[in-house]
Image (cartoon, helix red, strand yellow):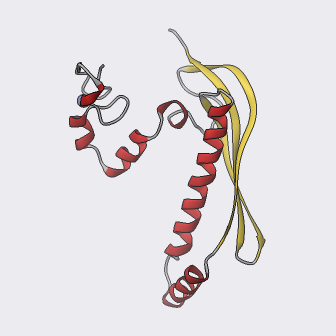
Amino acid sequence: MKCEKCKKDYPSEHYFSTESICRKCFAKMTPEEKTQARQPKAIYTMTTTAFTIDGYKIVKSLGVVRGVLVRSRSVFGTIGASLQTLIGGNITLFTELCEQTRADAFEMMASHAEEIGANAVIGVRYDTTEIMQGVTEVLCYGTAVIVKPVSS
Ligand SMILES: [Zn+2]
């Protein structure tokens, strides 16, 4: 097995923190990079808001995949956020909720894509609708495709 970062060869996956990054390299990464590296490769490195992926060609389109989530703000969160609006600035409680909900919707979409045999999702979009006061629908959708590296 080869580490994707340092290109060193290791005898087994015991030396690896993720599928393709060795423990040494992983330890040197920023928390952000670590989160990214831990996610299953096939789907996550291959989702894009664009309709093409550099270095890959689309061999099959499997149609639209989506993840839908409906979230209501908890009473506690609403009180907290109301206090924050009084103080002013970025309403972090809502920001966090939105971020988390989007991430969950994305996750659902990605696992749906995986289920139908896709290895990439292109044209990824988010859509948010407030259904009623405090209840928000978050939709994440894209086109599931099978891609292959372009051999040059
Ligand atoms: Zn390494």
Q: Position of residue 126 (x, y in %)?
A: 67, 52
Q: Position of residue 104 (x, y in %)?
A: 59, 54
Q: Is residue 101 above or below residue 16?
A: below
Q: Position of residue 32 (x, y in %)?
A: 37, 50
- Tell me what residue is drawn at x 28 percent, y 44 percent: 29
Q: Quadrant of residue 98?
A: bottom right
Q: Nearer the viewer, residue 76 or 53?
A: 76
Q: Residue furthest right?
A: 131
Quarter containing the N terminus: top left
Task: Please tell me in which quarter of the rendered image ligand 1 is found.
Answer: top left
Q: Nearer the viewer, residue 100 or 32?
A: 100
- Tell me what residue is drawn at x 30 percent, y 26 percent: 13
- Tell me what residue is drawn at x 51 percent, y 85 percent: 84
Q: Is residue 149 above or below residue 130?
A: above
Q: Is residue 74 above or below residue 36?
A: below
The answer, for residue 49, to whether it is visible in the render is no
